[in-house]
Image: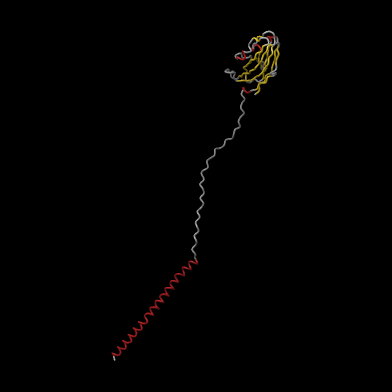
Amino acid sequence: MRKVIIALIAVVLIGCVVLVTKLSPQRDASNRAALAAVASMQSQQQVAPVATRTMSNPKPVQQPVQQPAVKPVESPKQSQPVAKPVEKAKPPVPSPDTWKVTVQDMGQTLVANTLQYQITAARVSMADGPIQPQNGNMFLLFDMNISNTGSGGVSLSPIMVFNLVDANQTTYSPDVLTSSEEALNVLLGPQRSVSGQVRFEVPKSVKQWTLQIDSSLVGASVSNIPVTISQ
C-alpha cells in the first residue's frame, strides 16, 4: 500500500512537473508581454510630461541680440581764434609833395615894361634834389619863363625881383642855391628868353601866400599874385 501511495505521488509529481513544464513557456511569454506593456506604459508616462512641457512651455525663440549703435567719437573741437574787429583803414595823411598849389594868372603873361613873366607851374616839395628844408619847413617852387622884348639888355636877379609874402606881411626871399634859379640870374639880351625855377623855403603851416614880382629895375610897378596851397 505504501508503495502504491508512493507510486501515485510520484505520478502526480511527474504530472505536475510535466504541466509546469508545458505552462512555463506561456507564462514566460505572458510575463514578457506584461513586462513589455509595463515598460511601454512607463515610457509613455515619461514622454507625455516632456511633450506636455514642450507644448505648454515652448522654449522661447532667441532673437538676435542687437548691438547698440556705436557713435563715432567726436574729436574735441579746436577753439577758433576770436576774430578781431576789422579796423577801418585811416586815410593816409597827404604828404606836402602831393599838396596842390593854385596860382592866380597861372600861364598868363605878366608884362612889366620890356619884361614879360609867365608862371608855367608851381608845386610843393620836401626835397629839391639832395637839398632838404629845415624841420617844419617845405619848398614852394615856381617854374617861369622870362622874355626881354626891349632893344637893350636887362640884368636879372631873382632875389631882387621875386618875394613871397604871408598874411602877416612876413617876406621870404628866394633861395639862390639852386642851379635852376641861377639860370634866371643873367644878363638877358634884347629879344631873348630864359626859363628857370624860383624856390622859396617856407613854413608848412602857412597856406596863403602872395607872390610879388618887382620889376622896378626896368621902371615897372609891383605885381601881386595870390597863391593858395591845399592838401
- Of 24 and 43, nearer the camera is 24
Left or right position of 140 against 56? right
Number of numbered markers: 0
Image quadrant occupied by the C terminus: top right
Image quadrant occupied by the N terminus: bottom left
The residue positioned farthest toward the top in the image shown: 152
The residue positioned farthest toward the front in the image shown: 191
Eyeballing the image, is 51 above or below 32? Answer: above
Eyeballing the image, is 147 above or below 63? Answer: above
**Residue 181 spot, x, y in % from top left:** 62, 14
**Residue 26 spot, x, y in % from top left:** 39, 80
**Residue 146 spot, x, y in % from top left:** 67, 13
The image's colouring method is secondary structure
Q: Where on the picture, by quarter, is residue 113? A: top right
**Residue 217 spot, x, y in % from top left:** 68, 9
Q: Where on the picture, by quarter, is residue 203? A: top right
